[in-house]
Image (cartoon, helix red, strand yellow):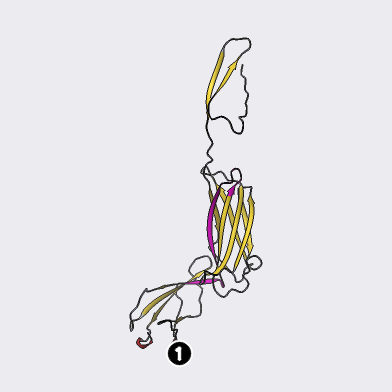
Amino acid sequence: SLYENSFTLPDEPVLGEWKVEVSVDSSKRKTSKTFLVKDFTPPPFQVYVETLPRVSFEGYQHKLAMKIYAKYPSDTMVKGTAEIQAKVYLANNPTVNLKELSRSVKVEEGTQTIEYDLKKDLDINLLISTAIVEFNVVFFEKKTSRNEARTVKVEVIPGRHYIKLDNQATFKPGFSYKIQASVFNINGELATTTFEPLKMILEYKYKNQRPTAEELITEESFLSGGKATFMLKPAVDAL
């Protein structure tokens, strides 16, 4: 015949070798089995934060969504709490925080989606240059309160396109200076829509003195395949 049973060890058992002994009343025979009780080390886990690298402030519902989850090496989801610290600053002036916001969310079903309203939550109301929203997420495991952190940054651009410049590091007075401007859609693909000619204004500074309006160098170029190339030649006496 077969007999099955189970028992639960105390929360803080004595570590080492344990023995289970079984005997039958009608028999003097006994049998035993040993097993080892060791200190439990929880497996490591990693926290993930998924969001778009950039969003547009123009023509959309002014929403920014992010998904948070954590996983063990076995791909099992971790339950816990995420503490989120968001701060907003301009890309060209990262030392000044425009807004700081804290939020705590429970992650019980494996993943949790959090949504921010750019206007109501983050106070981004009038955007004339690119802003950065930086999220610092600390995930606390429910069972042990162990924590893992992750930081992500999202660009909030004023329009539906953004420009990246590729230019020479140095140039010599009297020689042409090449600058290539690439125009991208919000999804990161090169823009193929026909635009008005891109206009470049080169503003130089010499010994901390900015040029006057008459000294500014301007150049126009047509967009081709999402890119425009400018060949500028500052006057020798302007440098």
The front one of 142 and 227 is: 142
**Under tag 1, what secondary structure?**
helix
Instruction: Please provide percent x and percent y for residue 207.
Output: 40, 82
Furthest residue to the bottom?
Answer: 214
Residue at 59 percent of width and 62 percent of height: 86
At label 1, counting other C-alpha atoms closer than 10 Å, the crowd grade (few under 14, some 14-19, many 20 or more) is few
Q: Is residue 153 magenta?
A: yes
The majority secondary structure of the magenta stretch comes to: strand
The quadrant of the image that shows the N terminus is: top right
Q: Is residue 46 above or below residue 128?
A: above
Residue with the mark numbered 1:
214
Residue 80 drawn at (x, y percent): 61, 48
Report the amino acid beneath label 1: Glu
Is 195 within the magenta?
A: no
Q: Nearer the viewer, residue 92 or 185?
A: 92
Q: Quadrant of residue 225?
A: bottom left
Q: Nearer the viewer, residue 113 or 146?
A: 146
Residue 43 location, x and y as percent?
52, 41
The stretch in magenta equals: 140-164
The residue under the point 60% across, 60% down is: 65
